[in-house]
Amino acid sequence: MGIRVIKHKDKPLANITKTVIKRSSKGEAPEKDSGKPVLTGLKGLKSLKGTALGVKQKELEPMLPEELQKLLVKQHYHIVGRHSAVKVCEWLRRSLMNESCCYKEQFYGIKSHRCLQMTPAVSWCTQKCAFCWRPVEWTLGTELKEWDDPDFIVEESIKAQRLLLSGYGGLKERVDQKKWEEAQNPTQAAISLAGEPTIYPQIGDLIASFHKHGFESTFLVTNGTFPDRLKEMSKEPTQLYLSLEAPTPQLYKQLDRPIIKDGWERLNETIDIFPLFKSKRVIRMTMVRGWNDSEKYIPKFAELINKAEPDFIEVKSYMCVGYSRKRLTLDNMLSHKEILDFSEKIGKATGFSLKDSKEDSRVALLKKA
C-alpha cells in the first residue's frame, strides 16, 4: 500500500489543508476535497526534509542523541529538521475547547488557537536556568555549526503543528470546530519553547520567513547572550522579549547558571542596545520565591529596566512544571497576590503602572505610566 504525496509548488501554504491524502495500492492520483480542512491523511505524509535545501534526507537527520529524541517525543515535541522543534501549548488546547486563553491573547490580542510555539535550537543554550522546564542536563552546546534553511524550518513547523492538532478535529462535541479549522493556518509564532533561539544564526531570516508565510506576529524570547546576533537581525520580530531574572552577577550565576564565561557581560550589552529596536520590547521577569523576590533587589532591577527602556514589563511567577521539579518545588512559586505586590513595587521604582494581570498564569503586565 503506497502513499502519494501531493506537491504544492503553486499553492500557498494556507490552502494545503484542503487536500486529502488518499492511501492507494494502485498509486492513482490523490483526490481533492473542496470543503473544510481535513487532516485525516496527514499521518501518512512523509517529511519533505531536504527539498528546501537541495540535500539528501540523511543529511538532515536530527542532530540529537537518540535517547534525547525519544524523551522529547514522549513530551509531545515534534522534531523539525536537525535542530528545531514544535510543541502545542496547553493554552492552545484550552482555547480550542473554549476553556481559557493564553495571557498573551488577553494582554496583546494574539489568538491562542492560532499560535505556533517553536524553537530553532531545541537543546542548545548558553544557560541552564534553575527554573527552566526543559531537561537542561541534555544541553548540547552553545552554538550550531550547521543549520537548516529558514523557509524549510517554517514550512515543516506548520506541518508539525497540523499533525499535532490532527486528533482534535474528531472531538466535535468538545472542540470548537471553527477554531480548529483556523488553527491549521497559524498566524502567530512564539519563538521560544526551549533552548536559546538566537543561537540559530539566521534568526532574522527565520522571522522574515514566518511573515512571508502569512504570519501576522512573531514573538521572540531571548536570554540576551547574543547581542551581536540581535543587532544583525535582517528583520525584527513584532515583539522582542528579554528575560531578566537576576539583577546582580552573583544571582545571575546562581539562578540562570550560565555555561559561558561572559554571560553577564553579554546580557548587559543586550540591555544597552535594547532601546534601539523598533519592535515592541518587553522585559520578562520570572520570579522564584527565595531566590529573586526579595525587596533588596528592586533598586538593581529598576536600574537595568530603566536602561533597557522597554514598552512593557511582564512579572510572572515560576511555575513548577517539567524538569524544573528536579531543582525547585511548589514552595518556589509565588501567589498571584505576591506577583501583584512585587509588580507594584517594581512599577514605583521604574515609572511603570499595572495595565493587566491574569491570575491563572500568575502574571502581571506593566506599562510606562
Image: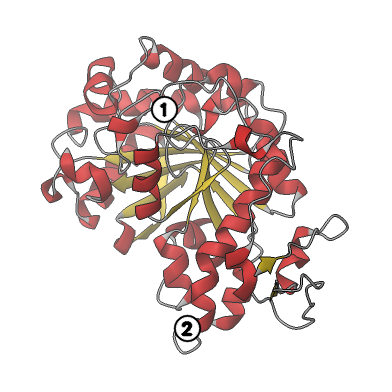
Q: Residue at x 23, y 22 (%)?
A: 251
Q: Is residue 58 left or right of residue 112?
A: right
Q: Is residue 227 left or right of residue 187?
A: left
Residue that lies at the very extreme toward the bottom in this rendered image: 173
SS category of the residue bearing label 2: loop
- Report which residue position mark 1 lands on: 125
340, 144: nearer the viewer: 144
The answer to whether 173 appears left or right of 240 in the picture is: left
User: Where residue 15 appears, x then y in whole percent?
Assistant: 77, 67
Please tell me whether residue 13 is drawn above or below residue 237 in the rendered image.
below
Work out whether mark 1 precedes mark 2 in sequence or the reverse, and give the earlier one. Answer: 1
Pair 1/2: label in front? 2
Foreground pick, 285 / 179: 179
Residue 180 in picture, x, y percent from top left = 57, 75
Which residue does the image show at 27% across and 23% down from the upper left? 257
- Left or right of 184 in this view: 247: left
Q: Quadrant of residue 285?
A: top left
Three-letter amino acid code of the residue under disc 1: Cys
Residue 345 position (above or below residue 365):
above
Labels 1 and 2 touching (C-beta < 8 A): no
Tell me the kind of residue under disc 2.
Leu
In the rendered image, the residue lying farthest to the right is: 10
Give the label on residue 171, or none. Answer: 2
Q: Is residue 110 visible?
A: no
Q: Measured from the top left, where is residue 239 in percent x and y?
A: 58, 42
What secondary structure is marked by label 1? loop
